[in-house]
Amino acid sequence: MALEDELAALNEWHFFHEFTYSKATFRPAPSQEAELADCIIWIGNLLVVYQLKERETQRNTTVEAEKRWFKKKVLGQATRQVRNTLAYLNEAGAIEIRNHRGHAFSLDIRSIHELHKLVVYLPHHALPENDRQIKHHRSRTAGVIHIIPANDYLGIVRTLLTPAEVIEYLGFREVLIDRWEAEIAVVPEPALVGQYLNGEIDVPPSVNFIEYLRCLDHRAEEWDMSGIISKFPDRVTSNNEPTDYYLIVRELALLKRNELREFKTRFQLSVDKARANEFVLPYRMACPGTNCGFVFIPVTRDILPHWRDALQNFTLAHKYELKLPKCIGVSIADDANGWFTAEWCYAEFPWEQDARMERLLRDNYPFRKVKQVELPRYEYREGK
């Protein structure tokens, strides 16, 4: 499988089909077609632009030939293509691109708050180590462009697992480049990932940080929500737009594993209470990093006829009380043969004072009290 196909498959698995755009093209004029980038990840106001380079199989090659390929194709052509992509985005305004679900959206660079640029390359084994140690290219117009071998990129994604953490790592890596440009060159990529796991940005990169990678305990069963996320496209009916669910999946994709763990805990509690037909107050949470709230409503049999009103009311009440710009509600009801039904509500609009909502919350408060807690970023096995 070609590098381009492998990276597309990897990205759509970890970043979801909805946010992965491969071979993105657009028409600067009706008779012209231009390629934006080999791959784009676009989640809300986050954008990652990829350019890929793969060394063709060489039977007879030399170290010097491989050095020339790296300089010409990776440091030269690929970084220039990244700059061209950014130039297109800055000059053309909104550009329509199509994702791996086949849905088209208008990408406007002015809506992007965080942008990362990557060149991912697959070299010949004869490429010398001092070239492989090059971790970035600094452009006058594009800023820092990450230079990452394909195997290292694979390791990054398979270690960090969630879109939010991979994107945060790229930001962390860029800060390391700016602060420790000489030191970062001689440290292998896994050590940089270990330093990200540790969270120390003010100390120079060191191979010692690999220990954090070695001891990382994923415990994915505690936070992985991909099974729920993957079911959203199948829930689209003729009564709603096929992309309506994107707003919900987007907010889930922006959560890190510690936040997803809290989400999954409340989701599962709601499933258990609904199956037991046990009335409890809704569970809820909010994530300051994304400014989004979540409320989970176990539905007992007596309120099944009114579940839609309950879902909307609880979602709006939670959003209002915590003064959030957006909120997601999910109601969960028992179903036949051990299954359950989950219905979702998404609300996003500026918070404004509402006397009626304040009166309802005062006279018939429907929630448990919330408290602010600091979640541990990662879990480690014994030895760290």
Image: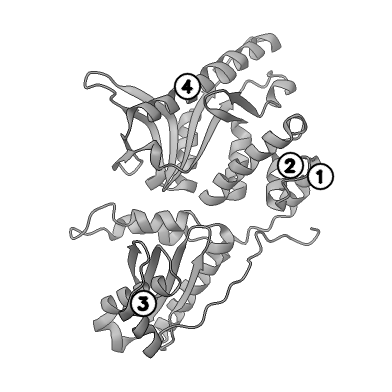
Q: Which mark is residue 81?
A: 4
User: First in sequence: mark 2 or mark 4?
Assistant: 4
Residue 296, compared with residue 327, is above or below; it is: below
Residue 105 seen from this side: yes
User: First in sequence: mark 1 or mark 2?
Assistant: 2
Q: Nearer the viewer, mark 1 or mark 4?
A: 4
Q: CA distance from mark 1 to mark 4?
A: 35 Å
In the image, taking residue 371 as reference, residue 253 lies left or right, namely left
Q: Which mark is residue 191?
A: 2
Q: Position of residue 208 (x, y in %)?
A: 81, 44
As helix, strand or loop, the secondary structure at mark 2 comes to: helix
Label 4: few (<14), some or many (≥20) within 10 Å?
A: some
As helix, strand or loop, the secondary structure at mark 3 comes to: helix
User: First in sequence: mark 3 or mark 1?
Assistant: 1
In the image, taking residue 187 as reference, residue 165 lies left or right, namely left
Q: Residue at x 47, y 21 (%)?
A: 81
Q: CA distance from mark 3 to mark 1?
A: 48 Å
Q: Which mark is residue 314?
A: 3
Among the 4 quarters of the image, the one containing residue 123: top right
Which residue is tagged 1? 208
Residue 173, compared with residue 360, is above or below; it is: above
As helix, strand or loop, the secondary structure at mark 4 comes to: helix
Q: Amino acid at mark 1?
A: Asn
Q: Position of residue 88 (x, y in %)?
A: 38, 26
Q: Position of residue 339 (x, y in %)?
A: 37, 73
Q: Amino acid at mark 4?
A: Gln
